[in-house]
């Protein structure tokens, strides 16, 4: 699904950037330019970011 129409960025590209170490909205803007034009994609980008970070955190082994 396209998240940022201005720059043609998809949710898959955002998730890939997160898998490669990007952990913040600022980082996604620097890496993919999301949110740097009209800003309409910011809320959706943040949802994708938060969902992916939660998935990563839940996949981590629990320390007792």
Image (cartoon, helix red, strand yellow):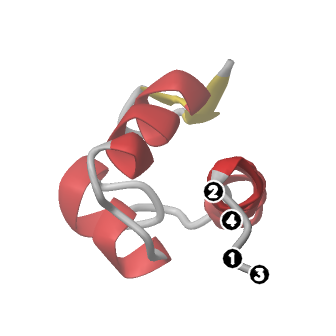
37 left or right of 1 in image? left
Marks 3,2: beta carbons within 8 A: no
Residue marked by disc 1: 63
Tell me the crowding category of disc 4: few under 14, some 14 to 19, or many 20 or more residues within 10 angstroms, Cα based. some
Bin the neighbour count of mark 3 within 10 Å (Cα to Cα): few under 14, some 14-19, many 20 and up: few
**Residues at circles 3 and 1 in contact by the CB criterion of under 8 Å:** yes
Q: Nearer the viewer, mark 2 or mark 4?
A: 2
Mark positioned earlier in the residue sequence (3 or 4) = 4
Q: Which residue is pictured at 47% across the width and 74% down the height? A: 25
Tell me whether the residue at label 1 lies in contact with that at label 4, contact meaning CB atoms closer than 8 angstroms: no
Question: CA separation, marks 2 and 1?
Answer: 9 Å
Relative image position of residue 45 (x, y in whole percent)? 64, 55
Residue matched to label 2? 60
Q: Which residue is mark 4?
A: 46
Mark earlier in primary sequence (2, 4):
4
Query: Rounded to the nearest whole Å, what is the CA distance between mark 3 and mark 4?
Result: 31 Å
Q: Residue at label 3?
A: 64
Quick one: label 1 or label 4, which is nearer the N terminus?
Answer: 4
């Amino acid at each position: 699904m396209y998240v940022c129409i201005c720059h043609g960025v998809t949710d898959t590209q955002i998730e890939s950037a997160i898998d490669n170490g990007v952990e913040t909205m600022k980082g996604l803007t620097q890496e993919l330019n999301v949110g740097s034009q009209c800003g309409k994609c910011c809320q959706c980008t943040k949802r994708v970011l938060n969902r992916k970070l939660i998935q990563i955190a839940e996949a981590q082994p629990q320390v007792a």
